[in-house]
Amino acid sequence: MFLILLLPSTGKGQTLGVSSNALGWAALSPNLGVELGFAKQWTVSVDGLVNPFTYENGKKSKVWLVQPEVRFWPRHKFSGHAFGLNADYGQYDWAMKKTGYKGDMIGVGASYAYAYSLSKRWNIEAQIGAGYHWLFFDNRYDRKDPHSSIGPRDRNTFGLTKLGIKFTYF
C-alpha cells in the first residue's frame, strides 16, 4: 500500500489488483498475487504459491514459489492482451516416485495473457508462459528411506513457467 502513495495516478483505470490462480487451487496449491500499475500500459506483479502436502507412503509434493513479473499492455493496463517477463525462485521437496528430490529452483521466462473485465472490480485472465529453470538438488533420496542421500546434482529444463486462469479484484 505504501508504494501506491509514491506513484502518480493516471486517473484512468485500476491501479492495484489482488489475484488468485484457479488452476493452482485445482492442483491443491494455495496461491495469491498482487499487481500494481505504474504507467498507462505497464504493471508489475508478484505471485506466490505454496503446496505443503504429504501423502500416504511417503509421497509428497512440497513446494513454495515466488514469481515477480513486469508486463506491457498494448492498449491499457489490466485489459486485453499483455506480454510479460518473469523470474521465479522457490524450494521443493518432491517425492512421488521411487526417488525424491529436495532443493532450490531459479527460473526466467516470457508470458502472454489476455484479461477480460467482468465488472468494475473483477477481471478474469488466461495466461501462459514458457522459460528456463535451473533445478539444484541439495539432496536426492529414496522415498522409502528419506534419510538416505544420493548426493547433490543439478538439472536445467525448458518448459512452462506460468499457466492459469486468474481472478483479480481491484
Image (cartoon, rainbow, N blue to C red):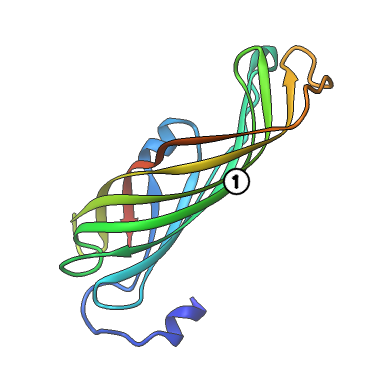
Q: Tell me if residue 68 can be seen.
A: yes
The 10 Å Cα crowd at callout 1, few under 14, some 14 to 19, many 20 or more, is some
Q: Is residue 105 left or right of residue 33?
A: right
State whether residue 157 is above or below residue 40: above
Q: Which residue of the protein is positioned furthest toward the right in this rendering?
A: 147
State whether residue 150 is above or below residue 131: above
Q: Is residue 53 left or right of residue 31?
A: right
Q: Residue drawn 66% across and 12% down?
A: 98
State whether residue 69 is above or below residue 20: below
Residue nearest the observer in this picture, 104 or 158: 158
Q: Residue drawn 15% across and 68% down?
A: 75
Residue 96 x/y as whole percent? 60, 18
Q: Is residue 60 left or right of residue 110?
A: right
Residue 38 x/y as whole percent? 35, 77
Q: Residue drawn 44% across and 85% down?
A: 5
Q: Quadrant of residue 70?
A: bottom left
Tell me the SS state at disc 1. strand
The residue that label 1 is drawn on is 90
State whether residue 154 is above or below residue 81: above
Q: Quadrant of residue 73?
A: bottom left
Q: Tell me if residue 170 can be seen.
A: no
Total count of labels: 1
Residue nearest the observer in this picture, 94 or 15: 94
Residue 47 x/y as whole percent? 47, 54
Residue 1 x/y as whole percent? 48, 76
Q: Residue drawn 45% across and 86% down?
A: 6
